[in-house]
Amino acid sequence: MMVGSCFAMLLALLAWGCAGNAGNAAPLNAATGKHPATWVQNHWADYVKTPDQCRSCHGSTADPALAGGISKVSCFTCHTNGVNHPAGWADPAQHGRGAKLAPSTDGMAMAGFAHCAKCHGDTYSNGLTVSCKACHTKAPHPDKPWYGTTPSGTNHNATDPGNAPECFKCHAAGANSVLKPLTVPPAGTAPGCFNDTMCHARF
């Protein structure tokens, strides 16, 4: 009985310690000492708002050697390159290259426009952190020759087609583009680069 009471008190203290300040606390079940089942998919939003609440249990989010904390669960287990943008990320060549990559399948890698949208918002200006439009007046992509076919690193022809659902937000049926699809695709057609759902027709 005494052991059970001590164990329950230890879990409650652990939850209180990991929670940080009231009101900024990450959701934690005091009885199990665990986050909700959906926490892995959704924790980034709470981290962006109050990073210190994660560090109190998981240790450093910048130094793998100091990560793990009292929970013994390191953020670097999933975020192998760290949880924040790498050094030099503000350079357009860096974050632009990352945004144009194939979207990450695990949601952890900084790849694909959808990953940017997690923190910067689905319109890239309504998120938890700085608006992309603070620099990119035509966010999420830079100004012309974005739509061109020259070898420029800022061209959309170098963007992985897996980003099509993000492009579709603004370019459904050729919206905001000088190009319009030639035919109307069947209802429910998934957004794609060359299937008449946006700007380009089928090959």
Image: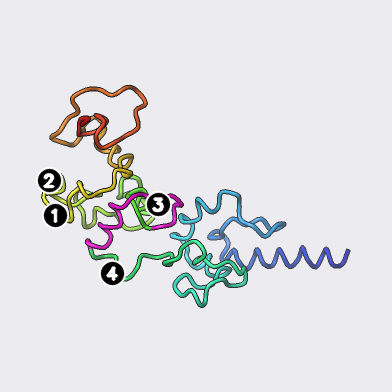
Q: In the displayed image of the protein, which residue is found farthest to the front?
A: 203
Judge depth for marks 3 and 4 and give the one in front: 3
Of mark 4 and mark 1, the one earlier in the sequence is 4
Of mark 2 and mark 4, the one earlier in the sequence is 4
Of mark 3 and mark 1, the one earlier in the sequence is 3
- Residue on which the image places disc 3: 104
101 part of magenta stretch: yes
Which amino acid, by three-letter code, is at mark 4?
A: Gly
Graded by Cα atoms within 10 Å as few (under 14), some (14 to 19) or many (20 or more), the crowding at tag 1 reads: few
- Residue on which the image places disc 4: 88
- Residue on which the image places disc 1: 152
Distance between mark 2 and mark 1 Cα atoms = 9 Å
Magenta stretch in the rendered image: 92-109
Distance between mark 3 and mark 1 Cα atoms = 24 Å
- Name the residue rendered at 29%, 37% in the picture: 168
SS for dot 3: loop
Q: Are marks 2 and 3 in contact (CB under 8 Å)?
A: no
Which amino acid, by three-letter code, is at mark 3?
A: Ser
